[in-house]
């Protein structure tokens, strides 16, 4: 199953980025084999709509679950409408977050964990 982890870098040993819409990278990972694709987040510096754009990107990549620290209301709605499950509280390295997910240690969320625009550039 393809899952996405928000990341500060482009490999499995990079730290998890706690932001969804404004993370530096998404690592699209096969949870069984750990094969991955690093996708630079072109929405990270957007003036607005970063969560929506990032959610649409995850949908286009066929992701079934997202592991991140926090998710805002627009990203939550976009991911939820696409049928993508959201797991909050991911931390450590991307590899550690995937292991926590596989061990059932991350919580699935039923709503956003932060207000909109909480991580705007310059905000």
Image: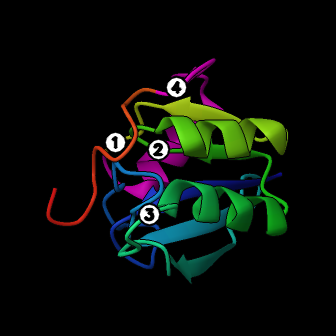
Please give the name of the residue rendered at 36% of the width and 54% of the height, measured from the top-left corner: 16
Q: Nearer the viewer, residue 61 or 90?
A: 61
Q: Earlier in the sequence, mark 3 or mark 4?
A: 3
Q: Earlier in the sequence, mark 2 or mark 1?
A: 2
Tell me where residue 86 appears, x and y as whole percent. 63, 35
Please give the name of the residue rendered at 71% of the width and 44% of the height, measured from the top-left corner: 79
Disc number for residue 48: 3
Disc number for residue 68: 2
Q: Earlier in the sequence, mark 4 or mark 2?
A: 2
Is 80 included in the stretch rendered in magenta?
Answer: no
Give me the C-alpha separation between circle 4 and circle 2.
Answer: 10 Å
Corner quadrant of residue 78: top right
Give me the C-alpha separation between circle 3 and circle 2.
Answer: 20 Å
Give me the C-alpha separation between circle 3 and circle 1.
Answer: 25 Å
Disc number for residue 106: 4
Which SS class for mark 1?
Answer: loop
Tell me the magenta residue range. Answer: 92-112
Callout 2 environment at 10 Å: few (<14), some (14 to 19), or many (20+)? Answer: many
Which SS class for mark 4?
Answer: loop
Please give the name of the residue rendered at 46% of the width and 38% of the height, measured from the top-left corner: 72
Tell me where residue 11 appears, x and y as whole percent. 45, 75
Is the C-beta separation of discs 2 and 1 under 8 Å?
no
Tell me where residue 1 appears, x and y as whole percent. 83, 51
Is the C-beta separation of discs 3 and 1 under 8 Å?
no
């Amino acid at each position: 199953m393809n899952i996405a982890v928000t990341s500060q870098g482009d490999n499995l040993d990079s730290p998890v980025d706690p932001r969804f819409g404004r993370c530096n990278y998404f690592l699209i990972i096969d949870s069984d084999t750990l094969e991955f694709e690093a996708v630079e987040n072109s929405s990270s510096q957007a003036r607005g709509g970063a969560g929506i754009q990032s959610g649409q990107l995850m949908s286009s990549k066929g992701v079934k679950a997202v592991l991140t620290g926090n998710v805002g209301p627009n990203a939550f709605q976009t991911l939820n409408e696409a049928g993508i499950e959201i797991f909050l509280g991911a931390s450590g390295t991307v590899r550690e977050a995937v292991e926590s997910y596989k061990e059932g240690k991350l919580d699935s969320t039923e709503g956003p964990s932060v207000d909109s625009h909480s991580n705007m550039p310059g905000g």
